[in-house]
Image (spheres, rainbow, N blue to C red):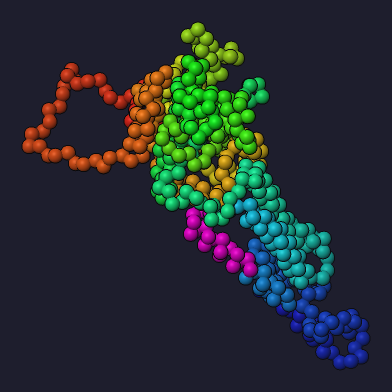
Amino acid sequence: MHNDEPRRSRRARHHRAPGSSADDGFDGYDGFDGDGDLDDYDEYDTHAGSGRFFGLTALSTVLPGAGLIPTRRRSFGLLLLLGALLLGALTLFYAWRKGFVVAALDLAVRPRILVTLLVATVVGAVLWCAGILLTASETAPRGPGRGWRALFAAVCCLLVVAPAVTAVRYLTIQHDVVSVLTGSNDADEEDANAWADKPRVNVLLLGSDAADDRVGVRTDSMMVASIDTQTGQTVLFSLPRNLEFAPIPSTNPLSRLYPSGYDCGDECLLNGIWTLATDHPDLFPGDDNPGLTSTRDVIGEILGLEIDRSLVVSLRGFQSLVDAMGGIDINVKERVCVSCKLVNGRIVFTDDKERWIETGQQRLDGYHALWYARSRAGSDDYSRMRRQRCVTGAIIDQADPVQLLRNYPALANVVKDNLTIDIPTSELPAWAELVGTIQEEGSIRSLPITNKVVRVADPDYAKIRRLVQSALNPPRQTAAPSSSAPAATPTPSESEPAATPTPSEPTDEVQDLATAC
């Protein structure tokens, strides 16, 4: 409680008889402000007034305008406070209704909303600081310490302005990223979620080894994620890069060159489709990316699926993404060499330093995760495909929004330069919600197209399509009929070798990704 003694003294002095002299203690100040009200804040109550100043100014810093309510600026303070509480309640309700991660993703992919949030952040910060400064002005006592009070008010404003500046920076970066990735690739609002009524949406995931020291683009990793649009259940299909006789649909212009499939011996492999298309731009008038178009068409024909959207990430972008995540946890099932290649059947380390990713649970940064996913020395393409699926699953499952946000400015530049998508801007919110469903409710299974499924030199594409459909629509399991006599269990000498494949052994069965990894 404030000490009221100084105020009573002033009131007593004020009521002295007219004509009282300075010798009687009257200094000429009548104790009233310009409105005729008693001024509670003069040089006699500096200590009490300072406490009120610091308390109410701090309150306006925590709750916009709250410190103005006990002052004559009560109306403005109530307006600020109620506006802030209403905005906060609406934000929490939206986040609770959609889930915090999905809500953040949903807002982050809407360019108009991003601009609105940016403007609202600036206006809100200005009004908040105005409330702090007005509170300081209204409650500041007369007397010494004016400089310290001004500094305190400035620090309070800084506590509001600093996060607002960071928010404006991030919103600007995000708007720029969305604009660069989608460009003018927009769609009408009614087509914003064209696949919503489809039971599944199929996304082509390509890892490109394009770099400054390479000629052309080779699709180093090729996978299709088929996602149930209601449950988020996902099946990953990975294809070996060296498939021959790749079928080219008649709707693709390359079919004019290879009407019976991409057939020219062991030089015509699946991962060469991209380069083949870019070498014949005359066949693709008006197409800015014939390599992606043709790769999508051919892979869709191989799997018997309609590819709805595609995402291409370069190796450099992949490495930076994992680093931005703070690394990924991988259960390494086979020893993998780093910075190495196979020369005459022997593993040679390119920097003359022998390095390995050892077996067991490992935390891999971007550099080592990239080598874990790409290394072929000492293993085969099918082991490599398994590792790529494991890394992809780890990225989807372990992406931490807080960690990504902390490193987002650097990551955004990498995304703009190393990621290509063909998703319209208006469709992004639906994808954000689907990604949230996958993380929260879905599971990921995988079906690798390995040499146990097909011979890469002479693939049975009809069989591949049957396996794909079986993976997407597994038959219902019925309970085995009961038997009065238990089945005989073979002894170890009579039984066959274990059916569980080793990490490098191919399998043609759909597996839960956690089991495969």
Q: Residue 282, image x and y in percent?
A: 63, 29
174 falls in the magenta region: no
Q: Nearer the viewer, residue 190 or 445?
A: 190
The quarter of the picture where residue 410 lies is: top right
Quadrant including the C terminus: top left
Q: How many marks on residues? A: 0
Q: Is residue 76 visible?
A: yes
Image point (72%, 55%), residue name = 161
Viewed as shown, does residue 493 lie left or right of 312?
Answer: left
Main structural element of the magenta stretch: helix, strand or loop?
helix
Q: Residue furthest top?
A: 344
Q: Is residue 323 visible?
A: no
The quarter of the picture where residue 72 lies is: bottom right
Q: Nearer the viewer, residue 219 or 87?
A: 219
Q: Is residue 268 above or below residue 427?
A: above
Q: Residue 349, image x and y in percent?
A: 55, 13
Image point (10%, 37%), residue name = 483
Q: Residue furthest bottom?
A: 17
Q: Residue 228, image x and y in percent?
A: 41, 45
Q: Is residue 342 above or below residue 59?
A: above
The quarter of the picture where residue 348 lies is: top right
Image point (57%, 41%), residue name = 422
Viewed as shown, does residue 26 lie left or right of 289?
Answer: right
102 falls in the magenta region: yes
Q: Is residue 1 above or below residue 288?
A: below
Q: Which region is colored magenta?
A: 83-105
Quadrant including the N terminus: bottom right
Q: Nearer the viewer, residue 416 or 424?
A: 424
Image point (62%, 70%), residue name = 82
Viewed as shown, does residue 109 lie left or right of 98?
Answer: right
